[in-house]
Amino acid sequence: MSSNLFRFIRQSRGLTQKKLSEMLGISEPMVCMIERGKKNVIEVNKKLRELFGNEYVDKCRTFLEEN
């Protein structure tokens, strides 16, 4: 999962970095670093998919790839 996809999912759900960090059980600075490509998003990929569902994450990925 790319940092762009991670950010897109957060924004598409109308979440702040703070709120998503709380939902994923990680720090807000970690969310920021992931979105800037400074940390590997693989660490939270599973949690993100559990939170929003595989189908939603895959649809977001497809949308980003097509646009």
Image (cartoon, rainbow, N blue to C red):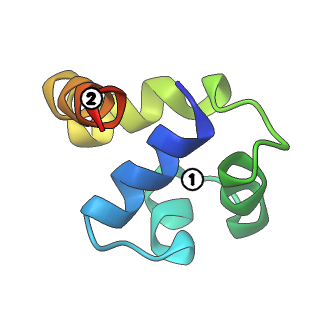
Q: Residue furthest right?
A: 38
Q: Residue furthest front?
A: 67
How far apart marks 2 and 1 lie (CA) works out to 31 Å
x%, y% of residue 41?
64, 32
x%, y% of residue 32?
71, 62
Q: Amino acid at mark 2?
A: Glu
Residue at 25 percent across and 63 percent down: it is 13
| Relative vertical location of residue 42 with respect to residue 7 in this rendering, above or below | above
Residue at 24 percent across and 23 percent down: it is 58
Where disc 2 sits, the SS reads helix
Quadrant of the drawing holding the C terminus: top left
Q: Amino acid at mark 1?
A: Gly
- Left or right: 2 as drawn, with respect to 8: right
Residue at 24 percent across and 41 percent down: it is 52
Where disc 1 sits, the SS reads loop
Q: Which residue is mark 2?
A: 66
Toward the viewer: 20 or 34?
A: 34
Which of the 4 image quadrants contains residue 33?
A: bottom right
Crowdedness near tag 2: few (<14), some (14–19) or many (≥20) residues, C-alpha within 10 Å: few
Q: Are marks 2 and 1 in contact (CB under 8 Å)?
A: no
| Relative vertical location of residue 35 with respect to residue 47 in this rendering, above or below | below
Residue 25, numbered circle: 1
Tell me which label, 2 or 1, sits earlier in the chain.
Answer: 1
| Relative vertical location of residue 13 with respect to residue 67 in this rendering, above or below | below
Crowdedness near tag 1: few (<14), some (14–19) or many (≥20) residues, C-alpha within 10 Å: few
x%, y% of residue 34?
70, 47
Which of the 4 image quadrants contains residue 27?
A: bottom right
- Left or right: 31 as drawn, with respect to 53: right
- Left or right: 39 as drawn, with respect to 18: right
x%, y% of residue 38?
85, 44
